Image: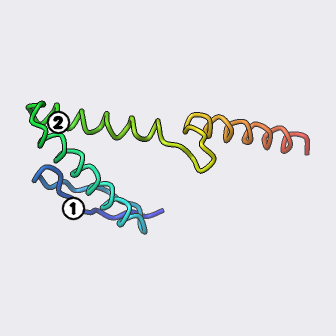
Amino acid sequence: MSSKNITVTIMAREFIVACPEGQEKSLLDSVQYLNQKIDLIQSQGSIVGIDRIIIMAALNITNELINSNTSDGESLSQFRHKISSIEHQIDEVLAQN
Protein backbone atom coordinates (compact mmCIF):
# COMPACT_ATOMS: atom_id res chain seq x y z
CA MET A 1 0.00 0.00 0.00
CA SER A 2 1.40 3.38 -0.91
CA SER A 3 1.57 6.30 1.45
CA LYS A 4 1.97 10.02 1.24
CA ASN A 5 3.22 12.69 3.58
CA ILE A 6 0.64 14.76 5.42
CA THR A 7 1.45 17.85 7.47
CA VAL A 8 -0.41 17.93 10.79
CA THR A 9 -0.37 20.44 13.63
CA ILE A 10 -0.17 19.30 17.24
CA MET A 11 0.28 21.86 20.03
CA ALA A 12 0.90 24.59 17.43
CA ARG A 13 3.82 22.60 15.96
CA GLU A 14 3.82 21.12 12.49
CA PHE A 15 4.78 17.51 11.87
CA ILE A 16 5.09 15.61 8.61
CA VAL A 17 3.56 12.16 8.97
CA ALA A 18 3.50 9.28 6.47
CA CYS A 19 -0.10 8.26 5.86
CA PRO A 20 -1.42 5.30 3.83
CA GLU A 21 -3.50 6.30 0.81
CA GLY A 22 -7.16 6.59 1.74
CA GLN A 23 -6.46 7.04 5.47
CA GLU A 24 -6.01 10.81 5.43
CA LYS A 25 -9.38 11.57 7.08
CA SER A 26 -8.72 9.03 9.82
CA LEU A 27 -5.30 10.57 10.50
CA LEU A 28 -6.73 14.09 10.61
CA ASP A 29 -9.54 12.94 12.91
CA SER A 30 -6.93 11.35 15.19
CA VAL A 31 -4.91 14.55 15.28
CA GLN A 32 -8.03 16.56 16.08
CA TYR A 33 -8.91 14.15 18.91
CA LEU A 34 -5.38 14.33 20.31
CA ASN A 35 -5.46 18.13 20.19
CA GLN A 36 -8.78 18.12 22.06
CA LYS A 37 -7.31 15.92 24.80
CA ILE A 38 -4.24 18.17 25.03
CA ASP A 39 -6.43 21.28 25.24
CA LEU A 40 -8.48 19.69 28.03
CA ILE A 41 -5.37 18.84 30.04
CA GLN A 42 -3.94 22.33 29.51
CA SER A 43 -7.21 23.96 30.55
CA GLN A 44 -7.16 22.10 33.84
CA GLY A 45 -3.79 23.70 34.54
CA SER A 46 -2.59 20.96 36.86
CA ILE A 47 0.12 19.63 34.54
CA VAL A 48 3.01 21.78 33.37
CA GLY A 49 5.44 20.99 30.58
CA ILE A 50 4.82 19.90 27.03
CA ASP A 51 6.25 16.42 27.57
CA ARG A 52 4.03 15.75 30.54
CA ILE A 53 0.94 17.08 28.79
CA ILE A 54 1.57 14.84 25.77
CA ILE A 55 2.20 11.81 27.99
CA MET A 56 -1.00 12.42 29.96
CA ALA A 57 -2.99 12.80 26.74
CA ALA A 58 -1.49 9.55 25.43
CA LEU A 59 -2.28 7.76 28.70
CA ASN A 60 -5.86 9.05 28.68
CA ILE A 61 -6.42 7.94 25.08
CA THR A 62 -4.81 4.54 25.73
CA ASN A 63 -7.00 4.07 28.79
CA GLU A 64 -10.09 4.91 26.72
CA LEU A 65 -9.06 2.36 24.10
CA ILE A 66 -8.39 -0.40 26.60
CA ASN A 67 -11.66 0.24 28.41
CA SER A 68 -13.74 0.65 25.29
CA ASN A 69 -16.37 -1.94 24.61
CA THR A 70 -17.45 -3.68 21.46
CA SER A 71 -21.12 -3.63 20.53
CA ASP A 72 -21.68 -6.81 22.56
CA GLY A 73 -20.17 -5.29 25.69
CA GLU A 74 -16.92 -7.18 25.41
CA SER A 75 -13.69 -5.47 26.34
CA LEU A 76 -11.00 -4.99 23.74
CA SER A 77 -8.82 -7.66 25.35
CA GLN A 78 -11.68 -10.17 25.24
CA PHE A 79 -12.26 -9.30 21.59
CA ARG A 80 -8.55 -9.80 20.80
CA HIS A 81 -8.61 -13.15 22.60
CA LYS A 82 -11.56 -14.29 20.47
CA ILE A 83 -9.78 -13.22 17.28
CA SER A 84 -6.66 -15.10 18.34
CA SER A 85 -8.73 -18.20 19.08
CA ILE A 86 -10.43 -18.02 15.68
CA GLU A 87 -7.06 -17.57 13.95
CA HIS A 88 -5.77 -20.67 15.77
CA GLN A 89 -8.81 -22.69 14.67
CA ILE A 90 -8.32 -21.56 11.06
CA ASP A 91 -4.64 -22.56 11.20
CA GLU A 92 -5.62 -26.02 12.47
CA VAL A 93 -8.15 -26.50 9.68
CA LEU A 94 -5.69 -25.35 7.03
CA ALA A 95 -3.01 -27.68 8.42
CA GLN A 96 -5.34 -30.66 8.03
CA ASN A 97 -5.89 -29.97 4.32
> With respect to residue 47, does 22 lie above or below?
below
| Disc 2 to disc 1, C-alpha distance | 21 Å
Task: Name the quadrant containing residue 3.
Answer: bottom left
Task: Name the quadrant containing residue 96.
Answer: top right
Q: Which amino acid does label 2 sit on?
A: Ile
**Residue in the image at 12% along x and 31% along y:** 47
Query: What numbered label is drawn on residue 31?
Result: none
Residue receiving disc 2: 53
**Residue in the image at 80% along x and 39% along y:** 89
Residue at the limit of the structure toward the bottom, as seen here? 22
| Secondary structure found at label 1 | strand
Work out whether mark 2 precedes mark 1 in sequence or the reverse, and give the earlier one: 1
Residue receiving disc 1: 7
**Residue in the image at 14% along x and 55% along y:** 14
- Give the percent coordinates (x, y) of residue 69: 53, 43
Q: Which amino acid does label 1 sit on?
A: Thr
- Give the percent coordinates (x, y) of residue 93: 86, 42
> With respect to residue 25, does 84 lie above or below?
above
